[in-house]
Amino acid sequence: MRKQRKRIGGGDVAKRDLTMAERRQAGFGCGLLFGLMLLAVLGSIGDDMCRTATFGRSTAPGGWWRARVQMTDCGALNGFSRVVRVQPSWLPEDRWLSCRAAALDGAHAVSLIWTRNTLHVVTDAQQSDVIDVARTCQGWRVQLHLRSGGP
């Protein structure tokens, strides 16, 4: 490998070729940067394409906690689902600041009832429509009651 010398600004500068390890590192760094930028762009577009509607709110007896029933609509390719979220009542409503207590597939009616230490989620959904139910959410026990005869 022969070094090339260039005269830049009155001094000699030696130019050398990159080693294979340096080329791999540069390629990995560029690929990682491109991937992160792509994720950021797709994430911001995805949030703009979805609309979230809140169907009901319920505040816990002490007033410190609030539960809400929401549906997020991301277009014709996605089905409808209802999600119950719990968070402190003094925080702005945001999915990142809340806990998902229950998720149901479909557009079922959902009622929220608070007792001493439990949030009761009452719905007319079938057991097959239940996506997820948390055991606890923000310190509250969560119980799902299906009016259709399920557990």
Image (cartoon, rainbow, N blue to C red):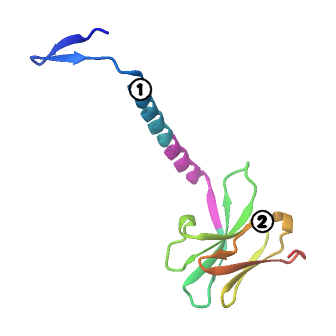
Magenta segment includes 39: yes
For the residue marked with disc 2, what is the amino acid? Ala
Q: Is residue 76 left or right of residue 38?
A: right
Q: Is residue 100 left or right of residue 22?
A: right
- Image point (48%, 42%), residue name: 36
- Tell me where the magenta segment starts and ends, as one range: 38-53
Q: Which residue is mark 1?
A: 21
Q: Could you say which is closer to the camera, residue 52 or residue 91?
A: 91
Q: Which residue is mark 2?
A: 107
Which numbered marker is on residue 10? none
Residue 5 higher or lower than 57, as above or below = above
Sort mark 2 into few (<14), some (14-19) or many (20+) by Cα contacts within 10 Å. some
In the rendered image, the residue lying farthest to the right is 149
Q: Are marks 2 and 1 in contact (CB under 8 Å)?
A: no
x and y percentages locating residue 127 in the rendered image? 85, 68
- Image point (56%, 88%), residue name: 63
Between disc 2 and disc 1, the foreground one is 1
Q: Is residue 80 left or right of residue 72?
A: right
Q: Could you say which is closer to the camera, residue 72 or residue 38?
A: 38
Magenta segment includes 90: no
For the residue marked with disc 1, what is the amino acid? Ala
x and y percentages locating residue 14 in the rendered image? 21, 16
- Image point (47%, 38%), residue name: 32
Q: Could you say which is closer to the camera, residue 42 or residue 2?
A: 2
